[in-house]
Amino acid sequence: MTAEIAILNKSAVALAADSAVSIQQGNQTKVYNSMNKLFTLSKSAPVGVMIYGTAQLSGMPWETLIKLYRQQLANRTFGTVSEYAEDFIRFVQDSDCYFPDDEQKDYVVSSEASPQTDERRGARGPGWVTSGAVG
């Protein structure tokens, strides 16, 4: 379970997330306290992303996707957080090199075949909020 919090006032936003991740192997669960769940989306603007649920999308870590997006975003900026979210979602949808069609089909088939055991199932999109203190 992930704990994330965003505290907002008229002039700032503060973001926080725990670093625990649970990995289940057979009937044993191991907890690691080293997972990054809070990321800077832009080098030029104070926009942060918090992830929860599974740490990957179709086998690709969210952290990698976010860093690749940030790299291609470069110094471009948008006027609203919604515009960043839309652009990031478009980036993920258009990333054929990271999610080839045959892999997408395999992912869907494996998710349907074993929804309770597929660790990729339940991937949720990142949460969007601005903050000057995201690192």
Image: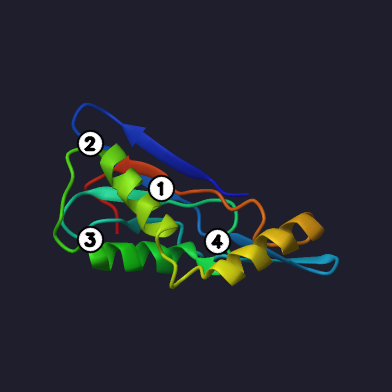
63 and 21: which is toward the camera: 63
Q: Give the mark toward the camera: 1 or 3.
A: 3
Q: Are marks 4 and 1 in contact (CB under 8 Å)?
A: no
Residue located beneath label 2 in the image = 12
Q: Amino acid at mark 3?
A: Leu
Q: Are marks 1 and 2 in contact (CB under 8 Å)?
A: no
Q: Is residue 81 above or below residue 107?
A: above
Q: Are marks 2 and 3 in contact (CB under 8 Å)?
A: no
Residue at the (51%, 59%) spot, across then down: 19
Residue located beneath label 1 in the image = 16
Instruction: Answer with mark 4 or mark 1, whichever residue precedes in sequence.
Output: 1
Figure quadrant of the C terminus:
bottom left
Residue at the (39%, 38%) spot, across then down: 6
Q: Secondary structure at mark 3?
A: helix
Q: Amino acid at mark 2?
A: Ala
| Numbered label attached to residue 73 | 3
Residue located beneath label 4 in the image = 55
Residue at the (48%, 44%) spot, across then down: 4
Q: Are marks 3 and 4 in contact (CB under 8 Å)?
A: no
Residue extending furthest top?
Answer: 10
